[in-house]
Amino acid sequence: MNTPAKEYSRVTLRGELTCLADLHPGSGEYGLRGDNNETTINELTYDCAKRPIIAAASLRGYLHAQFNEDDPNRIALFGNANNTDDSGQAGALRLYDCKLLNHTPEWDGQLRSRVAIDAITRTAKDKQLFTDLLIPCGSQFVVEMELDDISESALNALLSALASLNPNNPAAQLGQGKSHGRGNVQWNSTTIKVLDQEDLQQWLLKPNTALDKADWKTICEKDITNPTSAWQRLELRYCFDSPVLINDPSIVKEGENEPDLRFMRRGNKLLIPGSSIKGLFRARARRILMTISEGNPAKTDELINEMFGGEDGMGTIRFYDATALFKENEIHEQTMIAIDRFTGGVKDGAMLIAEAAKPKYATGTIALDKHKMKPWQHALWLYCLRDAMEGDLALGWGQARGFGAFHITTKPDSGDHFCDWENYIAPFNKDELNVWTTDLEEKLKEQTA
């Protein structure tokens, strides 16, 4: 005999979201920072009390995307307002804006600047400096949500979607900058309370009793299935062969003998932002495609946007921040001067002090969408990875001066140790590799969409 499915008249959930990476829930508005308001920044989303929030729509959108279109729990939770016969229904889920914990009036966030790099010249584009206001890694948000007239099956489906917000899921991201590693969060439930139909009716018979005084039952999240992520995580180790410098203008101080350029940090660690890593691989992929296609920029850019993301949507590969502990003796400071090409002497006013770092290595990850990556994208990624593992790429500022040289080692899917290219590619099926490379060549022959 089948046990009847449980039905709940009212459910309340309380929990926390912990930032596993820097987060930018942007509002689309601009603000000013600095002593003289000289820095234009991309602002966060705030509530009426000027407290940073993750908008309910952002979290709701993430949870909605975890369900298949034909899943009845999806309609029960989120509704179906787009029926062609006007028979849509509202969803049972009510979600509230997530507020930053331990917020104080003095809280001012964290600034991070980045520049757009020209894919051809590999130099910074003119007037393309962006400064984002970030909520730092480790910050926590309070989450509150309620449901009415919901089945136990739909509630468990919601809890399963929330469980996907975990450190093992590279795509557990909110806010802006997902493709370069921002916005990873982890869900931690604190309280789940339910009222069944009988308890609700008992409460209705007590007109002078507040709802929070009803006979609520507390349940826990045990036996909730953690969904399998569609994203494959690849661990990378960036081994530095020279000092590396990703400049952080926000920590540059004015004064005599102060560095004009300083490497980016997160606490006591060197930080290589995912945006820098993404830009590097994107430019390399474009160069490879231009070589194979014998110079077809329209088709090349179409494929690059499909793989790395563009104005039409997200790509199939994501890059995350790499970090490295560094010691004082691993800080490299170098004074440089520009030489006048005509006189051969020192160019007046062109002395530059650069502060770089040279730890042994930094660690980070990338993620590949196993379900959406096409054969040609696998081939292109392997071409890029081979160049990086063989030391053909350079990262950050001063590449022409010898800065930023590195090579990559990585862990295979079934391995425990970092390895070089030959050991990494050895287990791959040769026939499958041929299919991937052939698909890439055929793709480049197609007409531009």
Image (tube, helix red, strand yellow):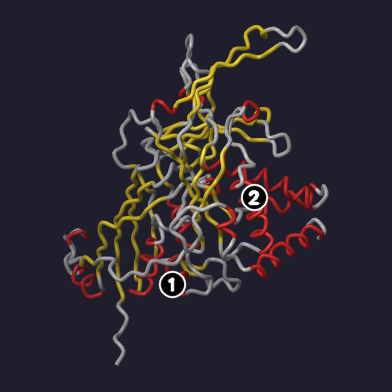
Please name whichever residue, 265 or 140, is drawn nearer the observer in this view of the structure: 265
Q: Provide the residue designation for mark 1.
A: 73
- Residue under the point 46% across and 24% down: 251
In-image side of 288 versus 138 (left or right): right
| Front label number (2 vs 1) | 2
Badge 1: how crowded within 10 Å, few (<14), some, or many (20+)? many
| Residue 277: % across, % down | 56, 42
In-image side of 217 versus 280 (left or right): left
| Residue 70: % across, % down | 52, 74
Q: Amino acid at mark 1?
A: Asn
| Residue 435: % across, % down | 70, 67
Q: Provide the residue designation for mark 2.
A: 384
Please name whichever residue, 217 or 323, is drawn nearer the observer in this view of the structure: 323
Q: Amino acid at mark 2?
A: Cys
Q: Is residue 8 above or below residue 302?
A: below
* Quarter holding residue 353: top right
* For marks 2 and 1 on the same chain, the one whose residue lies earlier in the sequence: 1
Badge 2: how crowded within 10 Å, few (<14), some, or many (20+)? many
In-image side of 280 versus 238 (left or right): right
